[in-house]
Image: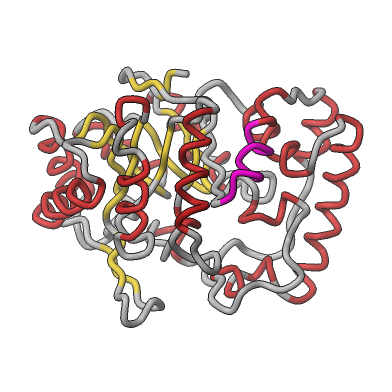
Amino acid sequence: MKLGTQGAEVSRLGLGCMGMSFAYGAADDNESVATLHRALDLGITFLDTADMYGFGANEELVGAAIADRRDEVFLATKFGIIGDPRDPSKRDVSGSPDYVRSAIDASLQRLGVDHVDLYYQHRVDPGVPVEETVGAMASLVEAGKVRYLGLSEASAETIRRAHAVHPITTVQSEWSLFSRDIEESVLPACRELGIGMVPYSPLGRGMLTGAMPSELAADDFRRTLPRFSGDNLDANLALVEEIRSVAARYDATPGQVALAWVLAQGNDVAPIPGTKRRKYLEENAAALQLELSADDLAGLSKLTPAGNRYPDMNWVAGQTAPQD
């Protein structure tokens, strides 16, 4: 499919690689590499990573896995969130031109490639005008280190300002049955400007699969999210049962229904569900064949989850969320 109007072509479904190295419990590099290879075999060639996932470990993992199949891959990575391996709770952001230039060189080295297909500003730096950041990103295109530019979790105003400096190919934001924030202003702005949408966490960080573990690992960052605790969790799991009832009519899983809903939002939408296991990758891929009725799409769109997607949603105005 064409992603945006700048010439980028990606698989209709991508693969988010974050959980292979970060945030969702223990890593299993062997299974992760097998999952990446299976994705390419299935035609899922749009791979998404970032320099802060595992503090560089995820880029190294992805790079090693695709080393002999680079030509098959549309490779996306991100910069802008700075973490401290000694204290994973610490986060900062940087959009300074000097940091942009150093970050891409570090990512290319870890990935073992001479260019990436898509380079995102992971979070907007409120201390640096986006025009300066995107100007530096544009210089990377001129240098041949990057083919297309993207933004992640940016406001409509920021997107317009960035696009005026250099064409933005895609915006990545959380978008699922349980996260609809972008539909008010971000999505219309993107469509007006011819920018593609890349929904991350289209499965609600696993909740929409209907296969949540009975207890999250101690280092699973979902423990910090309001939707995954107390009464909120109970209310949201009840909504998942409603999705399960829809899935039963299609002989599908709740996760496949959730993905089919996102895919039905437009042909400019390329979701990147994340997984580190072949089993779930294959389940996700099957959602490409699932077409929901208009009535089911409408009914699903009325679901309203309990709890915010982050503990502190004040970041939305400034677009500086801690991670995705």
Residue 223: image x %, image y %?
61, 74
> Quick check: 5 left or right of 140?
right
Q: Residue furthest bottom?
A: 86
Looking at the picture, does residue 77 appear above or below residue 312?
above
Residue 147: image x %, image y %?
23, 29
- Identify which residue is drawn at 21% across, 44% down: 112
Q: Nearer the viewer, residue 106 or 305?
A: 106
Decide whether residue 281 is among the magenta residues. Answer: yes
Residue 256: image x %, image y %?
72, 37
Decide whether residue 59 is among the magenta residues. Answer: no
Quadrant of residue 298 in the image? top right
Q: Nearer the viewer, residue 11 or 159?
A: 11
Q: Principal SS element in the magenta part?
A: helix
Tell me how the rendering is colored: secondary structure
> Quick check: 291 left or right of 50?
right
Quadrant of residue 149 in the image? top left
Looking at the picture, does residue 187 appear above or below residue 181?
above
Write down the region rendered in magenta. Answer: 277-285
> Quick check: 183 left or right of 227?
left
- Identify which residue is drawn at 61% across, 74% down: 217
Q: Nearer the viewer, residue 91 or 195?
A: 91
- Identify which residue is drawn at 29% across, 48% down: 121
Residue 97: image x %, image y %?
11, 52
Q: Nearer the viewer, residue 26 or 290?
A: 26
Give the mark count.
0
- Identify which residue is drawn at 81% across, 35% down: 252
> Quick check: 95 left or right of 228?
left
